[in-house]
Image (tube, grey):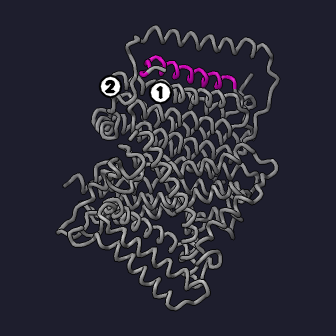
Amino acid sequence: MPATVPLAWFLILSAVLFSIGAAGFLLRRSILTVFMCIELMLNAVNLSFISFAHRWKAVDGHIFSFFVMVVAAAEAAVGLAIILTVFKNRNTLEIDEVSSLKL
Amino acid sequence: MNFFLLTVLKAVIIIFVLLTFCAYLTWIERKVLAHIQLRPGPYRVGPHGLLQPLSDVVKLITKEGVIPANANKVFYVLAPFLAVATALLSISVIPFGPEIEIFGIKTQMGLADLNASALLILAISSLGVYGIAIGGWASNSKYSLLGGLRSSAQMISYELPMALAIAAPLLIVNTLSFREMVAAQSGYWLGFIPKWNVFAGPFPQIFSFLFFLTAAFAETNRVPFDLPEAESELVAGFHTEYSSVNFAAFFTAEYANIVTICCVATLLFLGGWTPLWPAAYGSDYVPSVAFLAVAAVMLYHATQPLRFWDKYTYPVFGLIALVFAGAFQVPLLKPILIPLFWFAAKTLSLIFVFIWIRGTLPRFRYDQLMKFAWTFLFPVALVNLLITGLLVALT
Amino acid sequence: MDGLIFLTCAFIAVACATNLVLQTHPISSAISLVGVMVSLAVLYLLLGGEFIGFAQLIVYAGAIMVLFVFVIMLLNAGAERQYKRSVWVTVLGVPLLFGFLGLVAYFIQSRVPATDTVKFGAWTGGSARDFGRVLFSTYLLPFEVTSILILIAIVGAIVLAQKEID
């Protein structure tokens, strides 16, 4: 077990989490799970910012991460309101069934 | 001594004391409520019902644990675990006294001292919502789901005024760490008025104290905000379907939350472990005098026994009180026991206020409760924070 | 010791993330996501980000995910219907995913110099004091703009979710 952790490991963890989030986003059918995969991707990006802030010893990375969190909160609020409206109108939570604009 | 070993030892002591205190808090609550309602309370199990918590624990552990049909087993078992875990985590950053030295080992009285302890308390109380929400949902019952949803909505609504009420004294002491906060509140004006945050600074934080207590009642689901678990309204709210050890876990978590919030209020507003008047004017004798008074009352009642066992139990209680009174004067134990006494006295007074209000006030209806949070408490806490900030910036 | 802590947190994060993608019921996914967030908050705290670690717990795990759990309970979302997935998806997809992740790891490892190491506790500049100082001086404009963004989000959410006035 190394006494110091290479920075690359943090970035690899961030990339792995982002890929898992992207895979879930493309493969899942329930709209809520798709939304949660988006949040997972945002978290992975936050980890990247904060590891680089540690590397360059600058707190600006933390500020950026804070803004990502704030934007994620706003997006979650509006997105869940939209999900509620879609459920009220279509009575389904599967994204494949919201397809009335398809040819 | 090895830091790791010392921390483990402290953790064991603190958790043991906390859990025992939570069990006896149920006894205190039942006794105080009973005397408010002019009845004796638990009486038979042990002298004055002192063994009642023990018998409750034995009963709860030996009861049959029933998992309702169609309940989600994983979450049904996970929910009380989450509740207890978050309740016990927040006790880890609470300091109980200054730095002490026992047998040559210097250590802080308290498990951890973070630079941002106040933020940890807020974070853990935010995570405490999950135990209740998941517990209510996993029971697969209408009452539980409704109680769980109402309770979680109430808890997150009152988190905001609580955070604002915490932020106001933080502006005055200029730090997030509890130890530095208590250090900033030590000292006296005019030689005898303590510099606590309720009296302090450009704007006395008495309003923040009241808002914090109000939000604390809602966060811990106590009367007057206990509709989610009221017996007459929702059977028992989110813990309807829980029995035996799982129910004991929720119960313990609730009382541990009460203790934690009272400790936080003591540290933020009432000056932690600093005495009410300086030691130069004799405040070191207050604990001994208090215990001597208790011993006098016990021994007086021993001379006039009402029931059969009283002539044995009362003298024993009196002797124990005398031993405590003497212990506070031993010079070796004084620096440990006296700050602990003041901290415990303030926290216990706040816990008594919690129980007192439970016995006195009726409960809010759910929509009144939510309206109170969003239309009254949140704006007023915000205005309080703005005034405090303005006055701190101007001086 | 640092490596052990990092590997534990990383393992928990990846396990919870995989659980999120593989579970059928949204509630299990939500609790797994909370697990990811808590392990990431621990990593942030170790990297010197005191404020941002606790902010992650308060805002992300304590408010946003509670909102998710609420919506799942309100909509009574059930487990997803299982569609017949062709076996080729699993046979090709999983190895391709691992290959892609391996490629990414190799690429990152080769680009970041090996001397860039992280020692937990080496930098403590992420305290609330330093964070607030920079937030309210250099980044004041983005701060104000995001507060307006949150206001827009609140108004939008209320408008979208209210009952229709007939």
Separation of residues labelled 1 and 2 (CA atoms): 15 Å
Q: Which callout, 1 or 2, points at the residue further toward the start of the chain?
A: 1
User: How many numbered marks, from 0 up?
Assistant: 2
**Looking at the rendering, in which quadrant would you find the C terminus of chain B?**
bottom left
As drawn, B196 above or below C44: below
Residue A57: mark in rendering: 2
Residue placed most toward the observer, C115 or A91: C115
**Looking at the rendering, in which quadrant would you find the N terminus of chain B?**
top left
Is label 1 on the same chain as label 2? yes
Assign a secondary structure to mark 2: loop
Q: Chain of mark 2?
A: A
Quarter of the figure with residue C14: top right
Q: Chain of mark 1?
A: A
- The reply, left or right, for residue C52 in relation to residue B84 is left
Q: Label 2 near label 1: C-beta < 8 Å?
A: no
Work out whether residue B241 can be spotted.
yes
Magenta range: A3-27
Assign a secondary structure to mark 1: helix
Residue A47: mark in rendering: 1
Q: Residues within 10 Å of mark 2 (few under 14, many from 20)?
A: some
At which x and y percent is residue C72?
Answer: 67, 43
Type of amino acid at the residue the image marks with label 1: Leu
Outermost residue, bottom direction? B304
Type of amino acid at the residue the image marks with label 2: Lys
Quarter of the figure with residue B387: bottom left
Q: Residue at x 54, y 49 (%)?
A: B86
At which x and y percent is residue A63?
Answer: 38, 32
Work out whether residue C140 can be spotted.
no
